[in-house]
Amino acid sequence: MTGKEDEALQERLKAALWFAIGKIVDEDTLEIGVNATPQFIGSLTEMVWAQIESVSQDLESFSKHAGRTTISTDDVMLLSRRNEGLQEVLEHYLETLQPKKPKAAARR
C-alpha cells in the first residue's frame, strides 16, 4: 500500500469511527436529555482513535515477542491483565466460544 492509499484508508476508518461514535452519543444524549456538540464527538473520536492505535501496537508487539505474525486471543488476554473487569468479561466470552469437551468416562 502506498502512502497516499494508507492515508486514504486511515481517513475512511476515522470517518467510520466518527459516524459510529456520533450515533452512540446521539442515542445516549437523547435518553438523558442533553446535547453533545460536534466538537465533543470529534474530540471523543480522536481519543478513541489514539486508544485504538495504542492497543493495536501493544497487540502487535505481544504477537511478535511470541514469534507469531498473527495476533491471538492470548495477546488480547495479556493486554487485559491490568483491567480485571475487562479480563473477566473476555474470559467469559472465550468460554462461550470454545466447544465443550465431552467428559471422559470415569475410571474404576
Image: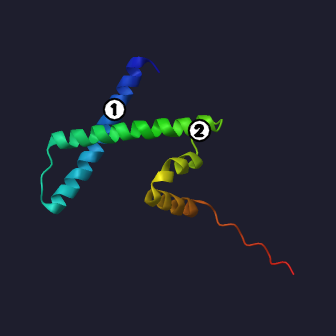
Residue visible at 47% across and 52% down?
82
The residue that disc 1 covers is 12
Q: Mark 1 or mark 2: name the one nearer the start of the chain.
A: 1
Q: Residue furthest right?
A: 108
Identity, as a three-letter code, of the amino acid under mark 1:
Arg
Above or below — where is 105 with respect to 20? below
Tell me where residue 54 appears, x and y as whole percent. 42, 37
Q: Residue furthest front?
A: 82
Tell me where residue 79 appears, x and y as whole percent. 50, 47
Question: Cβ–Cβ below 8 Å for labels 1 and 2?
Answer: no
Q: Residues within 10 Å of mark 1 (few under 14, many from 20)?
A: few
The reply, left or right, for residue 81 in relation to residue 41 is: right
Identity, as a three-letter code, of the amino acid under mark 2:
Ser
Q: Nearer the viewer, mark 1 or mark 2?
A: 2
The picture quadrant where one finds residue 10 is top left
Q: In the structure shown, which secondary structural element does the residue marked by tag 2 occupy?
A: helix
Quadrant of the snapshot with the C terminus: bottom right
The numbered mark at residue 63 is 2
Tell me where residue 63 appears, x and y as whole percent. 59, 38
Q: Residue furthest bottom?
A: 108
The numbered mark at residue 65 is none
Residue visible at 32% across and 29% down?
11
Q: Is residue 5 visible?
A: yes
Tell me where residue 49 appears, x and y as whole percent. 34, 38
The reply, left or right, for residue 44 in relation to residue 74 is: left
Residue visible at 40% across and 22% down?
5
From mark 1 to mark 2, how far is it between C-alphas?
A: 26 Å
Q: In the structure shown, which secondary structural element does the residue marked by tag 1 occupy?
A: helix
Q: Residues within 10 Å of mark 2 (few under 14, many from 20)?
A: some
